[in-house]
Amino acid sequence: MEGRYALPCYLAGAVAARAGDEMSGPALMLAGFALTGSTTDASSLLAGITIAAAVGGPVLGVLLDRAERPGRLLAGALVLYATGLGAILVGLGRLPFVVTILIAVSAGLSGPALSGGWTAQLPRVALGDQLPRANALDAMTFSVASLAGPALAGGLAETLGAPTAVVVSAVLIGLALPAAWMLPARPGRVRGARTTSVVSDLAAGLRVVVGSPSLARATLTSVFSCAAQGMLTACVPLLGERVLGGAGHGAVLLSCTASSALVANAVFARYPRSVAPDTVIWASALVQATAFALAASGQPAVLIVALLIAGIGEGPQLAALLAVRHREAPERLRGQIFTIGASLKITGFALGAAVAGPVATWSLPGASVLAASVAALAALGFFAIPSAAVNPSEDRAMPG
């Protein structure tokens, strides 16, 4: 992985793993419903694997930071996640459902390997001046995955059955194994040199996130932004039904957001130093607030434009967030800084979706306005951390 093709291999692995991850959620829900006939069981599977990812992220980050070859640990996490998906599929309808949920929770513990854990390894693949552009390209892999994963899950479920969609998602994750396994070793690591406990390392990572003004502001804004995104996502089926003429059309809205995020990040990759990432983070939250407010209009054309605008905010915000983490995270705590951030975002998204569901049933425009308000609050939250204490390095456009 350390040769000429290191970055392409990294990106290919990231796309495969993250597409499989994005595909696994919808595929599990569809398979759960098809094999049990219960929407409650289907949503419980998704909740189990998601909640576990939020809990397991920080611990996985500590282990990655302690590993001499973190790529080998990532590869093991990918195997556990893919095997867990297969075990869930085998258990549905055959094992007591509570056992299947426990399998989902166990598999979900390794889920952050596909997001923050993978991205934390990027500075060992793209060195020096390569990092800003590589970071933007890495952010694009999330957009590609969020565009392709759900669409592939739905298409396979319709043509070959929902269980096939789960199998394909596991296969995609498995395809990322070589790229993970060959990731470079951590330079200068002496075997057995780490003497601190896992608990103390976890505490150290949390102290860095809270104690670094740049990291704290970026994390706070991203979590609130994810909560707003979760709120809008919960509204998508109803928006599709009431505005576009069918609940299934809601997938078009998510595709609009993913497509515009991908295009926006492509521009970001072309000009990675044009705007400071810290500025992009709060400005993108305002862009999303505007988009979510427009989504309350109830007009089909305006709704589609609103979701396209939302992607223009989401894509660069993610790239900027990753840039801030790369810039501010100490090397010895890099893995857990990324996985802690990913876990908090997952939690924010889940809470946002949970809150918006009942609100959307009562008032769909009200739920969209609520999402817009939370996104605006995300931008304000950025400035809640005193700017006087911010590290002067914040003014740099990108790391490296």
Image (tube, rainbow, N blue to C red):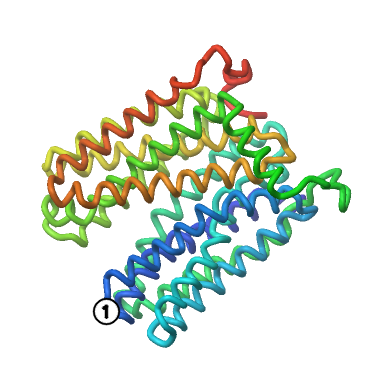
Please give left or right for residue 358 compared with residue 47 in the image: left
Q: Position of residue 350 (x, y in %)?
A: 38, 51
Circle 1 — which element? Answer: loop
Q: Give, as a three-letter code, the residue at label 1.
A: Gly
Residue 390 percent coordinates (x, y): 58, 18
Looking at the image, the residue that sits furthest to the top is: 388
* Residue 121 placement (x, y as % from top left): 67, 47
In the image, taking residue 342 as reference, residue 191 lies left or right, namely right
Q: Is residue 213 above or below residue 103?
A: above
- Comparing 15 with 167, the one in front is 167
Asked if residue 14 shows in the view, the reply is: no
Q: Residue at x 54, y 59 (%)?
A: 111
Q: Residue at x 25, y 47 (%)?
A: 356
Query: Considering only vertical position in the picture, is 156 above or below 330?
Result: below
The residue lying at 59 percent from left, 52 percent from top is 11
Mark 1 = which residue?
Answer: 37
The residue furthest bottom is 94
User: How many other residues sit within 10 Å of disc 1, few (<14), some (14-19) or many (≥20)?
Assistant: few
Q: Position of residue 284 (x, y in %)?
A: 39, 30
| Residue 213 in sight in this render | yes
Quadrant of the snapshot with the C terminus: top right
